Amino acid sequence: MTAKGLFAVETLGCRFNRYETAEIDYELERAGYVRAAVGQTPDLVVINTCTVTDRSDYQCRAAIRKVKERHPDALVVVAGCYAETNPAEVAAMGEVDLILGNAEKFDVALQVARLDRGRKSPLVAVGAQADGALPVRGVERLEGRTNAYLNIQSGCDEVCAFCVVRLARGKNRSADPDQVVAQVGRMADAGVKELVLAGINLGDYGKGGGPPFAFLVERILRETKIPRIRFSSLNPNTIEPALIDLMAADSRLMPHLHIPLQSGCDATLARMRRPYTTDDYERLVERIVAALPAVGLGADVLTSFPGETEEEFETTRQFIERLPFTTLHVFTFSPREGTEAWAMKVGGVPKDEARRRTGALKTIASGKNHAARKAAVGAVVPVLVETRRDREGMLRGFTPTYLPVTITGDDRLKGEIAPVRIVAAGESRLLGEATP
């Protein structure tokens, strides 16, 4: 196929966006475009955007301007969540040629072909409602990463008061289970050693007509030879006992779960419209730890939601303190237009107080992560070693519980699952040495 030009894709926001960027790369290459190498000037730049907070929107606008400054002659395509929820705002920027929503961004080559290069305003293709099964694309690995991923679910049917993602991503959709299993088999045959099953609300896979998530995972384990599997975020109300049992029974499933919490206070959770209580969450964690004593547990926590009193915050702080988290992502509430929280009249938390609360939970998060790293010292764990060394020339990887580790060892370890002895807990990562 004749090359149509050089392209580059810039990614902002969540890990799911990085996964989808790989799918955009895949579709552009299938259409005849060539990825621009370092030092080459792209003819086409796609910016895959995020809109989870006001800060995200600001970063998207800054990235658009920066891309146009660096590549003034390139076609600039703004795609993804910010384009989906704020197309008029993006269109008002003079740097943009094409605006694509989440349902349109994988057809970027087709949309670029529609462009009239002489037009003075950007072409806007936003708002199509994706339906049917989620496509399974043949992406085998993330650029520069040793693990691979597979998007098997998108969209969300929950109505959390603070969340703009459901507006940007649409209704729940799942990939066909036969296609998923076949693609995982191809990945394993291609040498992929670790697969991440990904989704916007991954635990909702299959709801509305397909097999449940745990059943799909069991099929993948039974019908493919993929060595390791991880999961992206799973909401607590979607984690079934069958999935926990599978994780306990099969070492190919990595002992790590990221389970969004958002608040440790029932009154706050109710205003947030989260579909669980703190008791539900704690009982789930107890069940997981009983089945997987060495599990790594991560969570998202949102501070200063409208109406969060000092008492409610303190309840959340104490709840987080007593649960065995290894990582916590702490965010300050950011009002998003179109959500229920945007119009809440119960009152916001002053900025200084919001910063204090966020800082207090980040301190707890840091302490818990340090404790998890200290507890790992002396253990020998299997680590998938990345193919690139860090700036200090060290190898890198993650423990099964998803703690980052820097490794001493030679290049033969790159891309391999190697036994690593943890010798120390550094400031932000473990220090390890490869063992025979």
Image: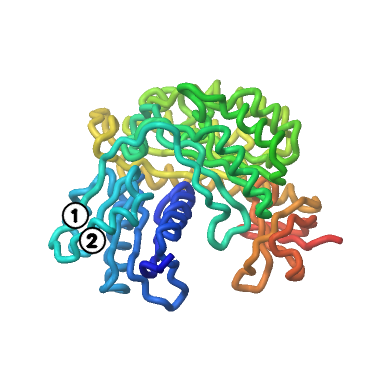
Instruction: Where is residue 255? Give x, y as percent.
Output: 68, 39
Q: Which residue is mark 2?
A: 96
In the rendered view, does 119 fall on the left or right side of 214? left
What residue do we see at 68% from left, 46% from top? 372
Judged from the image, the secondary structure of the residue bearing numbered disc 1 is helix
Give how far apart the Cα atoms at labels 1 and 2 are.
7 Å
Q: Amino acid at mark 2?
A: Val
Q: Which mark is residue 76?
A: none
The residue positioned farthest toward the right in the image shown: 436
Q: Which residue is mark 1?
A: 91
**Callout 2 environment at 10 Å: few (<14), some (14 to 19), or many (20+)?**
many
Q: Is residue 122 above or below residue 85?
A: below
In the rendered view, does 410 fall on the left or right side of 199? right
Counting residues from the start of the chain, the first of labels 1 and 2 encountered is: 1
In the rendered view, does 42 fall on the left or right side of 298? left
Instruction: Where is residue 364? Give x, y as percent.
Output: 55, 44
Q: Nearer the viewer, residue 381 or 4?
A: 4
The answer to the question of whether label 1 and label 2 lie on touching residues, with beta carbons closer than 8 A, is yes
What residue do we see at 57% from left, 53% from top? 140
Q: Amino acid at mark 1?
A: Ala
**Callout 1 environment at 10 Å: few (<14), some (14 to 19), or many (20+)?**
some
Q: Nearer the viewer, residue 223 or 293?
A: 223
Judged from the image, the secondary structure of the residue bearing numbered disc 2 is loop
Q: Is residue 387 above or below residue 203?
A: below
User: In the rendered image, which quarter contains the C terminus?
Assistant: bottom right
